[in-house]
Image (cartoon, helix red, strand yellow):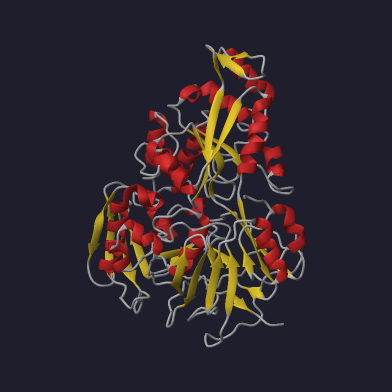
Amino acid sequence: MPHHLTCSAHEGEPVTTPRPVSHPRGARRLAAPLIAGLAVLTLAGCAGGAAETSATPGADVAQDIVFALKEDPTCIDPQQSSVTTSLIVGRQLTDSLLDQNPDTGEIVPWLASEWDVSDDLTSYTFTLRDGVTFSDGTPLTSDVVAANFDAIVALGASASLANGYLAGYAGTEVASDTEFTVNFSNPNVQFQQGATTISLGILSPETVAAPAETRCASVAGTGPFVLDSYVPNDSVKVVRRDGYDWASQLRQHEGEAYLSSVTFPIISEPSVRTGGLESGEYDVIQDVPYVDESRFSTGDYNLYAKANPGVPNSLVVNTTRGPLGDEAVRQAISKGLDRDQINVIAGSISGQAPTSVLTSSTPGYTDLGDVLAYDADGAKALLEDDGWTLGSNGIYEKDGQPLTVTVTAFYAQDVLEAAQIDLKKVGIDLQLKMVSSGDFFGAIASGDYDMLGAALTRTDPDALRTLLSTASKSRWGIVDDAELETLLQEQSQTADTAARQELVDEIQQIVAERAYVIPTLETVQLHGSRAGVEGITFDSAARLHLYDTAVVSD
């Protein structure tokens, strides 16, 4: 369930304060205005004190915690998955070439000690740090990185998010064990930020050589934890990696993780998770329901929250299906949504409704609150001018067909039910089709849907290209718009920050006005822990790091 926080204590403070970062030699910064000043919401210990580690144990101290997940990860391979629970687990097992400060947007070294970008954005040259190994003992080399990227491309739609970062991939040229260049057939401005994500996290040679199904059950990375077990629909367990010593400079310590192990039971019922946190059965829980927020806003608990960057929860449209090919119908749906009220129903009192087709925490965001303003009378007028007639049942119809559209989704049912109520008031019949995550992605593969209820987390405005471009392997919105396609491709190949921002502004305007993506809610990840469990942090895409997490005594 998506959330906004209602707690005001420590608003805008990071969970931990990153160490000062230094610029790698030879690195050329891209799109600084789109990155710098990245707005995030991260609150720690709302009303109960900030989550600051006052004392931390050595790696020789046994520390085991239980972290209750809200759903089965389904596939723990981070290159294939886009499910938050899967990525919470996968982030602990997997490191990336680069890292991104979630508060400033600055990109810093991680597995790569240096990198350089060609002026035309078609090649990225990296130097790997020394001494890194995978949990199976295999050394990290340039050949292994090349095999990872080649394997992602071969996975195709199974690795849709990862492939989005590799648009135009033309292979990896290996110069030595530690130096390599990733080449693209066309400029690829988003690859640098993509290299910070878990989707492009680097896995062992044995993992990337395995079939996709095998990878979903077992992966080996260079991360601070190692997969101990995964029992689908029951639990996952990870254990501390012996000898780990190559954390990103954004982390708060060096060497091995503090925790000895993390057990992730899969607890789908929210009340069971919250009850387990209160009783001490669970040390940490994923997805604190908004109605329970006040229960955990005391000194006995810490709350951790971060707004998701990228595309907000939205109705993502297939314009080839029924009435959704009609722009007036799509615009009426957008005007008929009372986003402020949806925001309240979904649990936010102090948060904000979406005001663009990118979230307000995304670099390059443009405020389009006027375009997305609630206007029930305007929605009805659009439909009537378009030839729709209000039927006796309160639903518009045309040529004997009612104005009925279906949204397919696997989460945020409360948000969709609120949208359903709003749209019924303006004569639009929105039907909900709630499915499993597997069936959701199956529908995407087949194109068998009117609209999708979904969001796309990305720390770059290129998320809209990933979602809508006809050339994108992970396209969810089915749109035939030559003008938009040209702009989407042009922004992905533009290094000049001011010029790219102009393109991104125009893209957001078109997508909102033509209602290809119809936002419903900005999502905030909200998790809770008992007091004494400290050091839980987010990456720039709102995924959790547990490397600095420790159980701290009073």
Occupied quadrant, residue 467? top left
Residue 65, placed above or below residue 122? below
Query: Taking 547 as reference, is 7 left or right?
Result: right
Residue 305 position, x and y percent, is 63, 59
User: In this view of the protein, can residue 373 be seen by the observer?
Assistant: no
Task: Using residue 324 as the reference point, say whether residue 195 is left or right of it.
Answer: left
When the figure is inspected, residue 514 is found, relative to residue 25, above or below; the finding is: above
Q: Is residue 322 above or below residue 148?
A: above
- Choose between 424 and 177: the one closer to the eye: 424
Q: Residue at 68% across / 43% down in the picture? A: 343
Residue depicted at x 67% and y 14%: 392
State the image quarter where residue 289 is shown.
bottom right
* Residue 514 image point, x, y percent: 51, 28
| Residue 361: x %, y % from top left | 58, 50
Q: Position of residue 244 (x, y in %)?
A: 43, 79
Where 522 falls versus 93 (above or below)?
Answer: above
Q: Is residue 25 left or right of residue 387?
A: left
Which residue is at 59% across, 68% downward? 67
What is the number of callouts on the image? 0
